[in-house]
Image: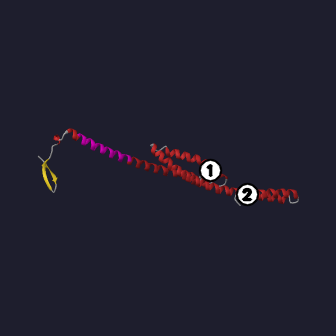
Amino acid sequence: MPTVLRLRGPQVTRRPETPIATIPAASGAATVLGAAGQVADQLSGIIERERNRFDEIRVSAAEVEFRREMDVALLDPADGILQQRGENAVKAADTFEDRMERAQAKVEGSLTSERQRALFLRASQRARVDASARVQAHLGGEMRQLDQATHEALVTQDLESVSRVAGDETAVRSLLASLEERIRLYDDRNGV
């Protein structure tokens, strides 16, 4: 019969190995079930961690795709919003929200779980806020330039009109009053 080493205090002794058949079934089953339960709990924890890790990786990939779509909407040389000037910038900005919605829906459709979609929604909202801020800054600059160009054209036109009616003092006064009001409104709009 095989033997096993056994530690007793400072001594090691040999004792006969207890055959499995002689272990009481109830205590063995409880031990096995307890161990199996612990293994199942550990395995469940590992599976959950790996599932979460997979979700985060998948959402990161989705966010990259969404940002790529946003970059096209913002920077495409042909129709990117940040490439548009003047009135075209205003028209392009009107379509920006729709373009972001379509891009978000397209990428969200590729996700496979509610958790992934929820994580992506948070990430995409941050990206949309950043992109919207860029569009607003661009649009603000374009509107200022458009306003200035329009203002200068109107002032030039008013001055030309004054020179055409130079002999009519009443018409000149009326045009100069209109010009003065136009300049005052422009200055008020631009904080001058």
Q: Amino acid at mark 2?
A: Tyr
**From the viewer's perspective, is the residue at label 1 or at label 2 nearer?**
2
Relative horizontal placement of residue 163, taking residue 7 as reference (left or right): right
What residue is drawn where x is 65% and y is 51%? 90
Helix, strand or loop status at disc 2: helix
State which tag comes first along the sequence, 1 or 2: 1
Instruction: Judge whether residue 148 is colored magenta.
Output: no
What residue is drawn where x is 64% and y is 52%? 89
Q: Amino acid at mark 1?
A: Ala
What residue is drawn where x is 22% and y is 40%? 27
Instruction: Find the magenta span and give its range.
Output: 29-48
For the residue pair 73 and 57, the one nearer the viewer reads as 57
Q: Position of residue 94 (x, y in %)?
A: 63, 48
Mark 1 crowd level (few <14, some 14–19, many ≥20, 10 Å Cα): many
Q: Position of residue 43 (x, y in %)?
A: 33, 46
What residue is drawn where x is 53% and y is 46%? 104
Q: Which mark is residue 186?
A: 2
**Magenta: main secondary structure:** helix
**Residue 180 sits in which quadrant?**
bottom right
Label 1 and label 2: CA atoms lie apart by: 24 Å
Residue that carries the numbered disc 1 in the rendered image: 93
Residue lying furthest left:
1
Q: Position of residue 18 (x, y in %)?
A: 15, 44
How was the colour assigned to the protein in this rendering? Answer: secondary structure
For the residue pair 11 and 165, the one nearer the viewer reads as 11
Is residue 21 depicted above or below 5 in this figure? above
Residue 15 appears anywhere in the view? yes
Relative horizontal placement of residue 11, taking residue 64 as reference (left or right): left
